[in-house]
Image (cartoon, grey):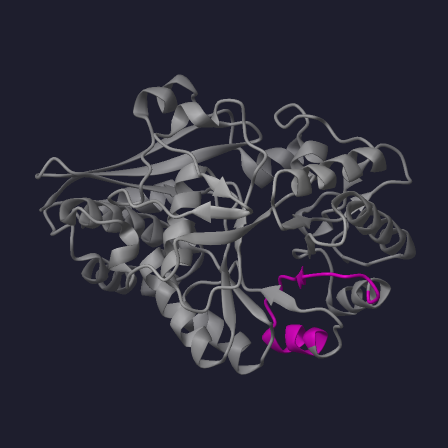
Amino acid sequence: MKVTKVETLSCDAGWRNYHFVKLSTDAGIVGWSEFDEGFGSPGVGAVIERLATRLIGQNAEDHERFYAEAYCLTRPAAGGVVAEGIGAIENALLDAKAKALGVPCYQLLGGKLRDRVRVYWSHCPTWRINHPRFYQPAVTDLDGVKRTAAEVRAKGFTGLKTNIFIHDDGPLRAWRAGFGVPFAPALNIERSILRNMRTHLEALRDGCGPDVDILIDLNFNAKPEGYLKILRAIADLDIFWVEIDSYDAKALAWVRDHSPHPIASCETLFGIREFMPYLDARSMDVAIIDGVWNGNWQAMKVAAVAEAYDVNVAPHNFYGHLCSFMAAHFAAAVPNLRIMEIDIDRLAWDRELFTHAPEFEAGHLIVPDRPGWGCDPIEEAIRAHPPAGTGGLIQYKSA
């Protein structure tokens, strides 16, 4: 089964765009993957187009050979956008190979350990605050925060993740200084942020009750001193994990050593080499792995190394439905799974874009048994929703 063509497609996804790889073969089998350019990664599509020229005529089943060759060709600038392009092609090759064999992708990853995967409702109620045009009902105050948390419980989900918000200084808004909103590059954490964070978390707890886990994602929005101030300010609250991004493994380990809550991290890292300093330093309790960025075959390697350190993993997943299925296959096959991220708030046209949508039961995602990832984009629908602007962080900041 030889690769005959590799294309990229994009479509409007509200405040960002969805991006896809379509890999055609001489057997008539098409492999699909989804990738992202909105989370600080402009240019992934260009990387895919350049690397695809080396793939034409190659065996679509030899995804590890492709990875090895692509890494050799890009070694001087490994990681970042280049690694994301390699990962996107790897995931499309996995889909094609599994379809050719007539098996789900989890069979290529070692087989299924679980039929369903516990998930948490991510960006709750972040999307309804930040992007009310696309995610309804809009949340504009603490009552709305409580109602959304109550909805999480009513729909049977057992976990939710939120972000940093300011409630008492003008309209309700996100505080995302690490991403330039507001532009405050010192990333200082002042008393007002601590006060608002407690207020927000307490409102969520009031709404969801005692049996729903609450996670908070601090992203890159502070420095070690600020993270420590936050952890001290919420030390008495019941928190499943605090998510922190840092490019300094030792600094993150210092924060973890002083934290009353479990620390999850590493969603922006690529490959075993980048994860190793964090595992050696015992920087996190849970290693978050982005299989969309890394490629799920490479993600399984990272998870295996994390297992040797007695560290569980969680897939990073806040994209379209195809990415959710890709994450579900990883989560089904990896032994040391903690939990899976997923966005429950969806665009009005999401269902038009994909052959299948995730199915849930008692707060768990049902792992599909269909060949490949078990979900394909629908080309006609993608072309009916052309991409709008750059999408993602760059467009959002300018807006």
Q: Please provide percent x and percent y for residue 144.
A: 79, 33
Q: Residue furthest top?
A: 384
Q: Please provide percent x and percent y for residue 304.
A: 39, 73
Q: Does 188 lie within the magenta span?
A: no
173 with respect to 337 (left or right): right
150 or 40, which is in the foreground? 150
Q: Does 245 lie within the magenta span?
A: yes
* Residue 148, above or below 197: above
Q: Please provide percent x and percent y for residue 19.
A: 40, 36
What range of the chain is rendered magenta?
A: 235-256
* Residue 298, above or below 275: above
Q: Tell me what residue is drawn at x 29 percent, y 61 percent.
A: 111
Is residue 124 something one can see in this rendering?
A: no
Q: Please provide percent x and percent y for residue 208.
A: 74, 45
Determine which quarter of the picture holds residue 82: bottom left
Determine which quarter of the picture holds residue 190: bottom right
Is residue 230 something one can see in this rendering?
A: yes
Q: Tell me what residue is drawn at x 72 percent, y 41 percent.
A: 149
Q: Tell me what residue is drawn at x 48 percent, y 32 percent.
A: 17
Q: Tell me the quadrant of the picture where the C terminus can be found.
A: top right
37 with respect to 97 (left or right): right
162 with respect to 66 (left or right): right
* Residue 254, above or below 57: below
Count of numbered circles in the view: 0
